[in-house]
Amino acid sequence: MMLKIIRNRERITNVRYVLSFEWSDTPGCGFNFDCDEKGNVSTTTANQSNYQKCISGEYDVINEGIEKRESSYMSPAIGKCICGEEVILDSFTNTCDRCERDYSMQGGLCSPREQWGEETGEHWSECY
């Protein structure tokens, strides 16, 4: 028996931009300031003092320009258990908080835990 999937698994991608400055005498070291895609740095940035010193020339840095940075992760599927509780399908085994039924990552209902490891002589906790 399958859980009713109410939200499919999906890849979430986050995009952010930084304005980068590198020390003239120490390549690979410097400052990154969060900004928009045009390079506008927020005036509320925690490092406002360092940003002002970079753009004023007080610091001997090279403006490396705007860098686009992307990161992504998988958002797990969510299913509705037989008892009506939502179950997040983010692990090999996913247990309903209300009725303690176990589901696979794909939403399939697992056998009762007492049966886990029956063929191999293992205790269910060794399979969990």
Image (spheres, rainbow, N blue to C red):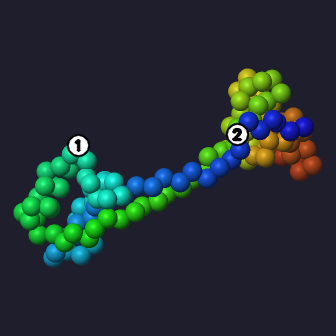
Residue 33 in the image: x percent, y percent? 27, 56
Viewer-side residue, 6 vs 111? 6
Among the two numbered marks 2 and 1 on one chain, the one whose residue lies closer to the N terminus = 2
Is the C-beta separation of discs 2 and 1 under 8 Å? no
In the displayed image of the protein, which residue is found farthest to the left?
58
Q: Does residue 12 lie above or below 59 as drawn?
A: above
Name the residue carrying label 2: 7
Report the side of 36 relative to 48 (left or right): right
Viewer-side residue, 24 vs 69? 69
Viewer-side residue, 92 vs 48? 48
Q: Where is residue 43, by image quadrant?
A: top left
| Label ID, residue 44 | 1
Name which residue lies at 33% across and 54% down: 36
Name which residue lies at 93% across and 49% down: 119
Report the side of 100 relative to 39 (left or right): right
Q: Secondary structure at mark 2?
A: strand
Q: Quadrant of the C terminus?
A: top right
Q: How many marks?
A: 2
Q: Amino acid at mark 1?
A: Thr
Residue 61 in the image: x percent, y percent? 16, 69
Q: Does residue 89 lie above or below 11 as drawn?
A: above
Residue 6 in the image: x percent, y percent? 74, 36
Q: Amino acid at mark 2?
A: Arg
Residue 8 in the image: x percent, y percent? 71, 44
Name which residue lies at 91% across and 44% down: 118
